[in-house]
Image (cartoon, rainbow, N blue to C red):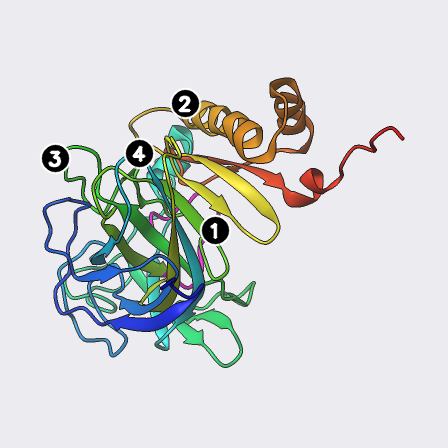
Amino acid sequence: MKLALILCASALNAETYHRTFYNKHPVKQRIQPGEIVTTRTLDSSGKDHESVERSDGPNPLTGPFFVEGAEPGDALEIRFSKVRLNRDWGYSGYRLGLFAMTPEYIEKTYPPVYKRDLVRKGFAHYVPWDLDRAHGLVRLREPGSQAIKMEFPAKPMLGCVGVAAPGDWAPTSSPSGSYGGNLDYNRIGEGATVTLPVYHPGALLFLGDGHALQGDGEPTGNGVETSMDVEFSVKVRKRAGLTGPRVETAEAIISIGSQPEFQSSLDRALEMATTDMVQYLMKDHGLEEWAAHLLIAFQGKYEVVTARGSMALVIPKAALAAKPQRPK
């Protein structure tokens, strides 16, 4: 008997959370390719949709999900059919990270201190945001600017999407790597598909770190942090030979040069993303190597994923749509 293309939905509401992408964590749920899974994530401090603290931070992870049939050397495609706000508040840092500014300016900037205990007990460098789910807006609650209305369209995303890291390595939920991890890429939202290499049987998928909004590079070191309702399904690509994360949206295919922040320069991340995109275009889209090089050169767009961390190379699908005319 063949499985239906889309299997019945299953739900996971976790009671315990992890903060490492480790292959030894107990499996929370076994899932089939094509099965629709609904779950929730905590915010980066460990609070849930009812503002109850369920875990220590940073970035507690929902999972792991064991994907039936996934083996080392395969690739796991995770398609997010829902990534939605599930409460009415979030928080962010009060100042850009010093890593995002020149040394000459750093000495002149303001301290990252607003109001102690306002958002998180024991912390003074966070400010609160109101999340207007009915109108899809994020609005800074305080402080108030005299020059600009700090209200923007929400763009919910997941900061953490990853599988268990290779070997017996147990990286925390703060950095990123070839396994995904704390990617913090603002295109990973509803409708996006993330593809990751598989290093262990079942892949062992983890999710977390929802942001209501985040700019390119995550220059404050966080987004508008909040909890999320998530719905996803997975597909296993056998013997895919993937070396790092890829993302696909309705408009583009994307290679990520994924590395921990401060490990190496953005130049290295750009090289990683470019090299992977050449392979992506050749193997998945049938381009000659020279054609892949020129398409990247004249249609590619580089995006800073995390300041002093990862880079993405974006190729619009429209550039891949035009086919050459065959001689009659």
Residue 168: assigned label? 3
Mark 1 to mark 4 CA distance (whole Å): 33 Å
SS at mark 4 in the image:
loop
Q: Main secondary structure of the magenta part?
A: loop
Q: Nearer the viewer, residue 198 or 328?
A: 328
Residue 268: assigned label? 2
**Residue 216 visible at all:** yes
Query: Is residue 129 shown above or below 264?
Result: below
Q: What crowding class fits label 3: few (fewer than 14 Cα within 10 Å), some (14-19), or many (20 or more)?
A: few
Mark 3 to mark 1 CA distance (whole Å): 33 Å
Q: Mark 1, mark 4: which one is toward the viewer?
A: 4
Q: What residue appears at the point 26 percent right and 36 percent down from the top-left corner?
A: 72
Quadrant of image for the C terminus: top right
Say which residue label 1 marks: 215
Question: Hey, what amino acid is under mark 1?
Answer: Gly
Mark 3 to mark 2 CA distance (whole Å): 25 Å
Mark 3 to mark 4 CA distance (whole Å): 16 Å
Image location (x, y in percent) of residue 311: 45, 34
Residue range highlighted in magenta: 211-223
Query: Which tag, 3 or 1, sits closer to the chain's start?
Result: 3
Quadrant of image for the N terminus: bottom left
Query: Which tag, 3 or 2, sits closer to the chain's start?
Result: 3
Say which residue label 4 marks: 73
Q: What residue appears at the point 44 percent right and 53 percent down from the top-left corner?
A: 188
Q: Nearer the viewer, residue 266 or 142?
A: 266
Q: What crowding class fits label 1: few (fewer than 14 Cα within 10 Å), some (14-19), or many (20 or more)?
A: some
Mark 2 to mark 4 CA distance (whole Å): 24 Å
Q: Are marks 1 and 4 in contact (CB under 8 Å)?
A: no
Question: Hey, what amino acid is under mark 3?
Answer: Asp
